[in-house]
Amino acid sequence: MLIDWFTVGAQALNFLILVWLLKRFLYRPILGAIDAREKRIAAELADADARKAEAEREREEFRRKNEQFDQQRTDRMKMAIIEVGVERQRLLDEARKAADGMRAKRQEALLSEAHNLNQAISRQAQQEVFSVARMALKDLAAANVDERISEVFIDRLLEMDSGSKERLGKALETTPDPALVRSAFDLPAEHRAAIEKALHDIFSIDVRVRFVVAPELVGGIELIANGQKLAWSIADYLTSLESQVDGLLAERGEVKTQTTLKHGSTSIAKTEGLNPKITEPSKLDRKGE
Amino acid sequence: MRLSPDDMVFWQQGFFKLNGTIVFTWGLMLVLAIGAMLITRNLSTELHRSRWQNLLEIIVTGIEQQIEDVGLRPARKYIGFLGTLFLFVALASLFTIVPGYEPPTGSLSTTAALALCVWVIVPLYGIREQGLGGYLKSYLEPTAIMLPFNIISELSRTLALAVRLFGNMMSGALILAILLSVTPFIFPVVMSALGLLTGMVQAYIFSILATVYIAAATRVTGPRSEPRPVPSA
């Protein structure tokens, strides 16, 4: 007999025991491990996905911010360039204005200085000339210059042309105030009397005269009555001399400016061009001394 | 000449006896159980794992996949029985390379026992899935006239299971024994290798047929038998 029923039963029992054993020691642990690993992998994948999504989001955010930053930078750069341009223009304008102001002030100061110097020189020159003239007159004619001046003035009165005489006479007649005689020095009484007499003789009227000392006249006398003036003064000669000297100085200054323009920059030339009135009088001054 | 390891009796006391079939079966059971215990003692749930664990995972997931391919879902519900069936039959023929070993599946008693187990477990699974009425009704399918044929089919396939496995395993062992006496060199090795292949094929056939029987028994008729919609990717 091929089939042994006891063996069949025993083998069936053995098989069932084996089923239980393998379920307990093989399938359950192995499948559990696989499940755990799958779960772990799924979790890791989910985590990776989440991280990827997060990274993607952050990347997008970063890109957006970067673009925004670039845009802002460009805008700010543009704005800064505009502001700098405006500021530069403003500063340039300010500087130009300040420079113009300073130049104008400096020019004014230079002019004023030159003017003062000129005045001082001319005054000094007048005084020197007057002094020399007086000394010469004194030595030559043994006469006082003041006296001579009074005489010259009286001579001028007498030598007046008829038109001038008529105008002056009318003025002396119509003036309510006394006629004003200004002189650089205090006239002595005899000179005053001589002048009054000469006026009386010339115009045949009683002329009331008031004598005033005016040092700026520099050795001269003038008669003023109701808007008419008769004057003689060394200052006239000196004025003429001054204008001649000024003309000469201006001429030399121009020459100097042209020379500088040939050799140097414009700014120096301008400065040099302003100088002649200052420097030349000082040279003259030294010469006078 | 022994046709079956049943004839190798070590001890007998009346009806009870201890023959080669039982002893070799115990040996296989010990190897399987202790091997599984040793390997699954330190299972790793990490990505890195031991080679033995890999081997067991491949075997278990392979069996699971086969069951699912036949149409039994969830496969884990059936893997205990079907997987053990396959592993026992496969290992029984694999051990034929050990000298002195005789496969217990070369005994009709063992194959009959396995076939009986299948014969018992199929209706049990069927009743569990369809209920007693549902399962019994399946014998009347497609018409009531088919009842005797269905019953005959049930018995004959169980018999076929037992005899097919027994025939293949016994013939393999028998051929090997004959060849050893005729040409003791080279040829027995070739036949032994062929026997290993046959054993594997038989293990696969036996377990896949059992799976098909269970799948047929657990298939719910009517609207419930409609295929489940495949979840879109």
Image (cartoon, coloured by chain):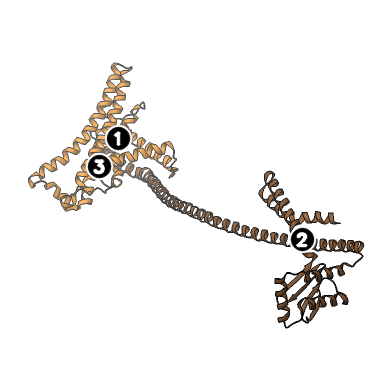
Chain colours: A brown, B orange
* Residue linked to disc 2: A118
Residue at (30% x, 16% y) in the render: B183
Residue at (32% x, 43% y) in the render: A19
Instruction: Give a yes or no on whether discs 3 and 1 share a subunit.
Output: yes
Q: Dot 1 surroundings within 10 Å: few (below 14), some, or many (20 or more)?
A: many
| Occupied quadrant, residue B196 | top left
- Return the x and y of residue A52 as percentages of the image width and height: 42, 49
Q: Is residue A10 visible?
A: no
Image mark for residue B117? 3
Q: Dot 2 surroundings within 10 Å: few (below 14), some, or many (20 or more)?
A: many
Q: CA distance from mark 3 to mark 1?
A: 14 Å
Residue at (86% x, 68% y) in the render: A148
Image mark for residue B89? 1
Instruction: Give a yes or no on whether discs 2 and 3 share a subunit.
Output: no
Q: Dot 3 surroundings within 10 Å: few (below 14), some, or many (20 or more)?
A: many
Q: Nearer the viewer, residue A91 or A271?
A: A271
Q: Nearer the viewer, residue B29 or B223?
A: B223
The subunit carrying tag 3 is: B
Q: Amino acid at mark 2?
A: Asn
- Return the x and y of residue A186 as percentages of the image width and height: 85, 74
Q: Amino acid at mark 3?
A: Cys
